Amino acid sequence: MKLKIALLAGLAAIVFSGNVAARHAPLVNPAPITVPANLSDKEISKEIRRALLQRGWEVDSETPGVIDSTLHLREHVAKIKVTYGNGQVKLAYVDSTNLEYKKDRNGTEEIHPNYLNWMQFLSNDIKANLSVASLNHEG
């Protein structure tokens, strides 16, 4: 009987630890986005803000080359910093609430996989907006 209980406890630990692990993914910022050469900083900023707003992000502050933004989605909050200049746009994690962010002793950061999806969608939208703006510039 004790063996059955021990086996069931061990099996439960394996099953539940798998569910917890599936709710975390390594925190990796999206790859830098290349900016078309014919766009001004003003145009770049406009297209970044357009993508942020279309995805439900709020623009908290903006200074030349930097946009701070927050997403409130149900009980989740994500804060990012968008930097642009030298022909690139970069998205970087700043802070979050209820996204299971953690940093281990080795410095490895993890977060809920949904955050990574949101960042990839945003990155794709910024890339598309910049491309369209560049085409409009040529026309």
Image: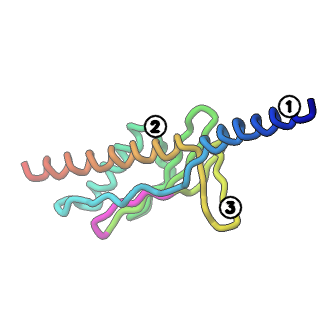
Numbered badge on residue 58: none
Main secondary structure type of the part rendered in magenta: strand
Query: Which range is magenta?
Result: 86-92
- Which of the marked residues, 1 or 3, is nearer the chain's N terminus? 1
Numbered badge on residue 4: 1
Q: In percent of the image, x 13 and y 52: which residue is there?
A: 137
Measured as percent of width and height from the top left, residue 64 is found at: 39, 64
Residue type, numbered disc 1: Lys
Dot 2, crowdedness within 10 Å: few (<14), some or many (≥20)? few
**Mark 1 residue element:** helix
Q: Nearer the viewer, residue 119 or 103?
A: 103
- Which of the marked residues, 2 or 1, is nearer the chain's N terminus? 1
Dot 3, crowdedness within 10 Å: few (<14), some or many (≥20)? few
Q: Nearer the viewer, residue 50 or 61?
A: 50
**Mark 3 residue element:** loop
Residue type, numbered disc 2: Gly
Point out the residue furthest to the left here: 139
Numbered badge on residue 104: 3
- In the displayed structure, 23 sits above or below 67; it is above
Q: Nearer the viewer, mark 1 or mark 3?
A: 1
Measured as percent of width and height from the top left, residue 54 is found at: 38, 37
Measured as percent of width and height from the top left, residue 132 is found at: 19, 46
**Mark 2 residue element:** loop
Q: Nearer the viewer, mark 3 or mark 2?
A: 3
**Residue occupied by mark 2:** 56
Q: Is residue 99 left or right of residue 139?
A: right
Measured as percent of width and height from the top left, residue 121 is found at: 39, 42
**Which picture quadrant has residue 4?**
top right
